[in-house]
Image: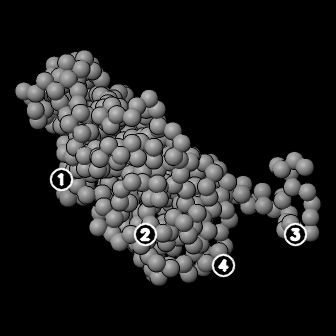
Amino acid sequence: MNPGIPSAGANLPLVDADEIRRVLEDYFERGWTDGLPVMPVTESVLAEFLDATTHDPDEVLLDMPHLNRACTVRLAAINAAMAGCRPEYFPVVVAAWAALQAENYVTRGIWQSTTGTAPMLLVNGPIREQIGLNSRGNVFGSGFRANATIGRAIRLTAINAFGLRPGELDQATQGNPAKYTACIAENEEESPWAPFHVEHGFDPQASTVTAMTMRSVAHIEARHTTVPEQLGVEIAGTIARTGALIHETISACIVLGPEHAVLLARAGWSKDDLRRFVYEHAVNSREALAAAGKDAVSGKTRWRLSSEHAEAVPDSTPDADVVRVLGSEQAVQIIVAGAHNAGVSAVIETFGPRGGPPAIAPVEPV
Amino acid sequence: MLELAGVPAVSICTEAFVVPARAMADVYGHPEFEFVTIPHPIASLGPEEIEANVRPIVADVVRILVGA
């Protein structure tokens, strides 16, 4: 039997496919989608989502004062249902909005910027297992409903509650693929270190969502080494690329595959050891910066540009021949995710906080 | 924002941002809001090219500022 074409059976729901298509097409015509079909939402469906949280439907989860628009619990629930979430995912969506509010970039218009960032969500704690969030193989990829739809719930809300449609209020030059969805879980079980939320003061039995404003996910191939310093240089070199520098410094989240995390831990490295190593080695020579036309900053915007530019002023370390791209060790977050099957890791290139604490919100126990 | 605070101002944007500029004006309830456009881009131009692009809009800027 072809697995793609189910045979008729007594246990299959009886529906009018033409009616379903008509509903889906109506959602497209109203501009309520991200380009993919959405789940139709009725009052009874919405009620199931609102029952999954103690928050009041009219409570504001995230405010964009410059647009005079806000996302309420009700709007978040409608869009979560449209995204294909199950009601039991909704507390994670609510926590995601709290984390985005705490991060404070979205509230200041970053989703409208030409840079084209996307929200990257990281989930920690027992909720991962309870709702089937993937933290292992293909963690950035497709195939897992909770990951796919929780991330998508944020995008659909951006479109429908805030009106951030491409070419209108969303001016992204290229955007990035994570604008469809980006929600990962930490592989706490195969990490040699404390989980990310525990590192930041939460109880191991608490569940949390961390929000990051991401520009891209850069892939690192390092199957060749068992030497921690070599792996550290690969990661630092990935972070240091001049193309990532719009400001004087950047921030990043290192997503170690379990194999790399275990390699480092076996050599006696803690997360802080890796953070320190990367901070010290994520550098460009003054010459390399000059070759890219980024060896100074603008006196007006502090964006990097050539020292020959009319607006150029020296950067923060004008006498240094080797220039750090990270303002502090704290500009680097470290998590573990993916399958324990190869020497592969990644760097999420983030927009801040360039030294401040990450934006973490607890998931309400249900 | 400046105009809401009573300070005469004029918005200038490049042609690449006309649609979002119009959308922002709608958000603030002023769909008739008048702004001036210049060719895109700006960031990669030298001072002479910038000046050449700006000269044609000077009259419009002054007209909007004085509310004529």
Is residue A145 among what the camera can see? yes
Residue carrying label 2: A207
Residue carrying label 4: A44
Mark closer to the observer (4, 3)? 3
Is residue A181 among what the camera can see? no
Q: Chain of mark 2?
A: A
Mark closer to the observer (1, 4)? 4
Q: Which mark is residue B7?
A: 1
Q: Is residue A321 above or below residue A156?
A: above
Mark closer to the observer (1, 2)? 2
Image side of residue B59 versus residue A165, left or right: left
Three-letter amino acid code of the residue under disc 3: Asn
Instruction: Name the residue nearer the viewer: B33 or A10.
Output: A10
Three-letter amino acid code of the residue under disc 2: Ser
Specify whether disc 1 shares its chain with disc 3. no
Residue carrying label 3: A11
Residue visible at 55% across and 56% down? A134
Image side of residue A101 versus residue B3, left or right: right
Q: Disc 1 to disc 4, how far (Cα)?
A: 50 Å
Q: Disc 2 to disc 3, how far (Cα)?
A: 37 Å
**Picture coordinates of residue A171 (x, y %)?**
43, 42
Q: Chain of mark 3?
A: A
Mark closer to the observer (4, 2)? 2
Mark closer to the observer (1, 3)? 3
Q: Is residue A113 above or below residue A362?
A: above
Residue visible at 77% across and 58% down? A22
Kindly state the secondary structure of the residue where label 1 is placed: loop
Q: Is residue B35 above or below residue A211?
A: above
Residue visible at 78% across and 61% down? A20
